[in-house]
Image (cartoon, grey):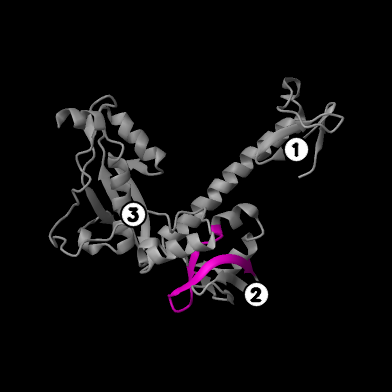
Amino acid sequence: MGWVTAGDYEVTLDAGKVVCRNAAGRRLKSVPAKLADDPAVVGLRQLAEWLERHERQCLADVERWMVHSLPVPLAVIARVWPDPAWQSALRDLVVTGPDGGVAGFLRDADLDRGLGLIDLDGDTVRISPDLVRIPHPVLLDDLEELREFAVELGLEQSAQQLTRGVWHRPGGLDAEAHAVEEYAGGVFKELRFLHARATQLGYRVRGGDAVCSLREDGRAVEARVWIGDYESYAETETGPLTFADGSGRTLRPGQVGPVAWSEGMRMAAALYAGRDIEDEEKAA
């Protein structure tokens, strides 16, 4: 963007920060303190904050489309593509074609010409599906190969797709089990530490559970990990992972789809990773 007058100086945004130059055009190391309340500086700082929130929201929306298996109309992708924040969130993601197979990496979107992709042969192609599908990585059969190919092509995804941790449901799972104990028992010195970790990771805390809500195959599914709801200074530990449908009815782990399983295990593992390692080492 251009330079805006602020007193005897000029200011602008550069990489999300307000920068300043003097009347001679020399860029200063910092914005002079006397300009802190200048309307131009205040306005630019507010703009920078809004742009940062906008970028976070675009990224969150794209990841929600992926995690919730939500198809998005081509017209929507094409219309938001000129926005740098949306383009950054969408660029280089793996998308599937009308047949459900991987079509390539997203590089462009246009209302008339459709999606511009790099296909699995490294060629630039265009497709025009009515709905754009961004598959969850657990659904990609050739995930490791796609990761390697993306590195070879120098592609970088802002949204966590190829870099997202995935968990595949084991084949020998007990059909009668109602919970997954793999990441249960992670001790936290105080309940508030575990609550704070769940919140920082982006999960809701409700009724003593950390909750990951999603949709798979058209139905609502919740993954839940018990984290406690007692005194904030009391010691607590992570509970087992359980699943429930949209009405709150408990689902056996074998009844949930691959995305719900992966996202539930991802949440449970992330919570468990923050446990008190020091006490574990002393106990050992």
Does residue 234 appear anywhere in the picture?
A: yes
Residue at coordinates 37% horizontally, 60% vertically from top-left? 215
Alpha carbon distance from label 2 to label 1: 36 Å
The mark lying in front, picked from 3 and 1, is 1
Instruction: Please report the residue visible at 72 percent of the width from the left and 21 percent of the height from the top.
Output: 33
Q: Helix or strand or loop: what does disc 2 sit on?
A: loop
Check the image and name the residue furthest to the bottom.
Answer: 99
Give the residue number, with chain letter if any, for mark 1.
12
Check disc 1 and report its element: helix, strand or loop: strand
Residue at image mark 3 = 263
What type is the residue that disc 3 sits on? Glu
Q: Residues within 10 Å of mark 3 (few under 14, many from 20)?
A: many
Q: Identify residue for label 2.
A: 113
Task: Tell me the amino acid under the disc marked 1.
Answer: Thr
Residue 64 against residue 184 in the figure, above or below? below
Q: Is residue 71 left or right of residue 245?
A: right
| Discs 3, 1 touching: Cβ within 8 Å | no
Return the residue found at the far front. 152
In screen coordinates, is 208 left or right of 181?
right
Q: Which range is magenta?
A: 90-110
Name the amino acid, label 2: Arg
Residue 230 visible within the image: no
Q: Is 57 one of the magenta-colored residues?
A: no
The location of residue 76, given as percent across then percent down, is 59, 65
